[in-house]
Image (spheres, rainbow, N blue to C red):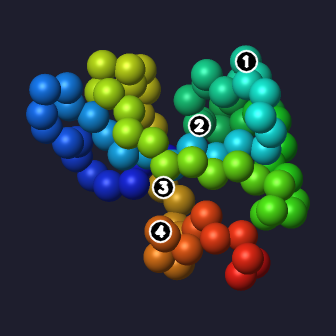
Amino acid sequence: MLLQEGFARGNEPSISVMEFASGKERRDSDLLPYLDTFAHFFAPLPNDYSQMNIHFRTVPLSDVECVTETVLKIDQPMKAINDKRGI
């Protein structure tokens, strides 16, 4: 998920993203864009927030293959998202 509009300029332009997953192993479905057409291929996310892995990453723009128009609304500060104590 993109964390901000636009990209960081510099020697190598990059974007800030939030990665969320349900396990440590990678799956083939991790490479699919988040579109309704592919939803049935995705592994389900856990029901318990403490089992979800969330990472904030900076991705070089040259590594981006697809950007969708899917919008997720989050009603809390970004720094609170990875705090599993309050949920």
Circle 2 SS class = loop
Q: Of the residues tagged 1 and 2, which is closer to the observer?
A: 1
Q: Which amino acid, mark 3? A: Val
Q: Are marks 4 and 1 in contact (CB under 8 Å)?
A: no
Q: Using the image, tell me which numbered label, if any, was put on residue 77.
A: none
Q: Earlier in the sequence, mark 4 or mark 3?
A: 3
Q: Using the image, tell me which numbered label, if any, was put on residue 28.
A: 1
Name the residue carrying label 4.
78
- Pick the quarter of the image with the C terminus: bottom right
Residue occupying image coordinates x 66% and y 27%: 30
Q: Which amino acid, mark 2? A: Tyr
Label 3 CA crowd tier, 10 Å (few <14, some 14–19, many 20+): few
Residue 73 is situated, as x and y percent measured from the top left of the image, at: 51, 67
What is the CA distance from the residue labelled 4 to the residue labelled 2? 21 Å
Q: Earlier in the sequence, mark 3 or mark 2?
A: 2
- In this view, the residue in front, 10 or 6, is 10
Q: Are marks 4 and 3 in contact (CB under 8 Å)?
A: no
Q: Using the image, tell me which numbered label, if any, was put on residue 34.
A: 2
Figure check: 62 above or below 58: above
What is the CA distance from the residue labelled 1 to the residue labelled 3? 23 Å
Residue occupying image coordinates x 39% and y 54%: 3
Residue occupying image coordinates x 76% and y 23%: 27
